[in-house]
Image (cartoon, helix red, strand yellow):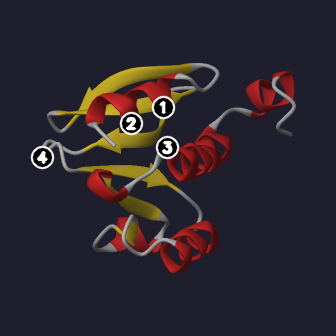
Amino acid sequence: MSPDAFRSIALSLPGSEEGSHGGHPDFRVGGKVFASLWDDDLHGMVKLTPEQQLEYVEAHPEVFAPVKGTWGIRGCTRVTLKAAKAPILRRAMRDAWRNTAPKRLLGEHGES
């Protein structure tokens, strides 16, 4: 998985926009971040629930790990791009998007 492929998956989700914070790209829906790319071109982050994070980390430990500190405890999950395959990243990205998107947008796309 390349950073460009990560970006493409993020931007394929309804209402997604690319922004920036801390000097690296992030991906937002409704003005809120659901994913980001780290500035090392090796990792990304998806904003999952703690329960979702546990599921992904247990199923794919080579791809997913909690971000260090409080952010990780709250569900922010590191993605190792080199190990990530598109189908599982699409699923995780969709979950992160769904966790963040406004209810109106979820309803418009049958995600409520």
Question: Nearer the viewer's eye, disc 3 or disc 2?
Answer: 3
- Rounded to the nearest angstrom, the CA distance separating label 3 from label 2 is 8 Å
Judging from the image, what secondary structure is the residue with disc 1 in?
Answer: helix
Identified by mark 3, the residue type is Ala
Position in image of residue 104 (x %, y %)? 79, 26
Judging from the image, what secondary structure is the residue with disc 3 in?
Answer: helix
Identified by mark 1, the residue type is Ala
First in sequence: mark 4 or mark 2? 2
Identified by mark 2, the residue type is Phe
Mark 1: give few (<14), some (14-19) or many (20+) Cα within 10 Å. Answer: many
Q: Quadrant of residue 39?
A: top left
First in sequence: mark 3 or mark 4? 4
Q: Which residue is mark 4?
A: 40
Tell me whether circle 4 and circle 2 mark residues in contact (CB < 8 Å): no
> Residue at 70% across / 32% down in the picture?
102
- Rounded to the nearest angstrom, the CA distance separating label 1 from label 2 is 6 Å
Q: Which residue is mark 1?
A: 10
Foreground pick, 43 / 72: 43
Q: Which residue is mark 3?
A: 86
The quarter of the picture where the N terminus appears is: top left
Mark 3: give few (<14), some (14-19) or many (20+) Cα within 10 Å. Answer: few
Foreground pick, 73 / 82: 82
Q: Is residue 37 left or right of residue 28?
A: left
Question: Nearer the viewer's eye, disc 3 or disc 4?
Answer: 3
The quarter of the picture where the C terminus appears is: top right
> Residue at 55% across / 58% down in the picture?
48
- Rounded to the nearest angstrom, the CA distance separating label 3 from label 4 is 20 Å
Q: Which residue is mark 2?
A: 6
First in sequence: mark 1 or mark 4? 1
